[in-house]
Image (cartoon, grey):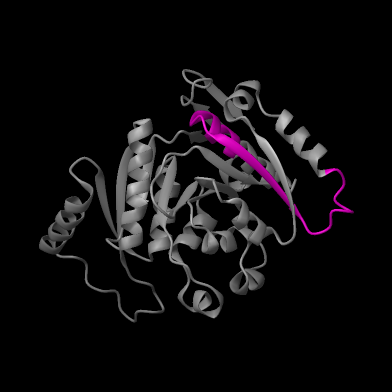
């Protein structure tokens, strides 16, 4: 069961600028919803790249590292220090503890550089059983959420999650469908209207969805539509490994081009379909909603 708003938030924290940005986004959500925060630091080591694992941190070094992190994040949050491949260790922790949300910072990489160096954030997003917020840009109130859809089951699941999140935060929902062939796409406005009508009445009233269509390539049109939005919500699902290595999925390409946070929802098979929503905006406050 996926829950929104999150009550337990894990942040990938390595003292870099992008991880400090991720922490600020996570802290804003935690303050709004009364969630707990945990900073997870992974001392990196990757078998096959490093010939020998580095020695474990001495007690003194661990205390020094913990104090350094504590000085950045404050006294309240929990700090966990792990050792190994950062993405694998974060995913292992997520599968064991099932937090409600993981927040990561992202480095923009593309093409061959991405293939060689990889991306911890993208690996976590593609493998996580729980939603992952890829933090970008300044922290600001969430007043409008963009939900791109292509009418596949997984995108409609992401749309439901976006609608539920918007309802809880009393934010507007913008639903976007991009087509490269309007002649063969049928009546897109009608299909979007039907999709919106299937939302529970409480969610519909709170998020006040508006439908928009565009013609062209999906990624540039999604990035264009992000103007005036505070989050983009997309579903993480696997495709061809060869294709992904060089071109990436729509989600990965949006991640590299977006200037606002992208909330990445695990595909239904990983998320076990259920979505529990509680609290939030005026129409949702004090109630629990289930979207499937």
Q: Front-most of 91 and 71? A: 71
Q: Front-most of 81 and 135? A: 135
Point 21% across, 53% down: residue = 72
Point 61% across, 48% down: residue = 267
Point 75% across, 45% down: residue = 151
Please provide percent x and percent y for residue 289: 56, 24
Q: In this view, does 189 lie to the left or right of 140?
A: right
Q: Quadrant of residue 121?
A: bottom left
Q: Which residue lies furthest to the left in this view?
A: 60
Magenta residue span: 162-187
Whether residue 78 can be seen here: yes
Q: Which residue lies furthest to the top in this view?
A: 286
Please provide percent x and percent y for residue 105: 40, 58
Q: Quadrant of residue 141?
A: top left
Please provide percent x and percent y for residue 40: 31, 53
Q: In which quarter of the image is residue 20?
A: bottom left
Specify the quadrant that holds the C terminus: top right
């Amino acid at each position: 069961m996926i829950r929104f708003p999150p009550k337990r938030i894990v942040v990938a924290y390595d003292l870099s600028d992008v991880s400090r940005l991720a922490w600020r986004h996570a802290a804003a959500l935690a303050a709004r919803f009364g969630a707990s925060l945990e900073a997870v630091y992974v001392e990196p080591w990757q078998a096959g790249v490093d010939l020998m694992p580095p020695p474990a941190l001495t007690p003194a070094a661990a205390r020094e590292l913990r104090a350094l992190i504590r000085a950045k994040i404050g006294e309240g949050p929990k700090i966990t220090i792990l050792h190994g491949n950062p993405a694998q260790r974060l995913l292992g922790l997520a599968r064991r503890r099932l937090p409600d949300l993981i927040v990561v910072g992202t480095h923009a990489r593309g093409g061959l550089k991405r293939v060689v160096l990889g991306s911890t954030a993208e690996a976590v997003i593609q493998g996580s059983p729980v939603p992952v917020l890829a933090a970008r840009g300044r922290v600001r109130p969430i007043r409008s959420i963009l939900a791109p859809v292509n009418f596949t089951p997984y995108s409609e699941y992401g749309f439901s999650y976006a609608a539920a999140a918007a309802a809880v935060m009393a934010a507007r929902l913008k639903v976007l469908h991009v087509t490269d062939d309007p002649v063969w796409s049928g009546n897109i406005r009608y299909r979007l209207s039907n999709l919106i009508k299937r939302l529970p009445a409480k969610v519909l009233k709170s998020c006040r969805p508006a439908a928009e269509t565009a013609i062209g390539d999906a990624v540039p049109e999604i990035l264009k539509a992000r103007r005036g939005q505070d989050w983009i919500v997309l579903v993480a699902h696997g495709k061809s490994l060869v294709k992904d290595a060089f071109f990436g999925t729509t989600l990965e390409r949006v991640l590299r081009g977006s200037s606002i946070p992208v909330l990445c929802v695990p595909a239904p098979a990983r998320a076990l379909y259920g979505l529990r929503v509680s609290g939030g905006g005026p129409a949702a406050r004090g109630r629990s909603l289930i979207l499937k």
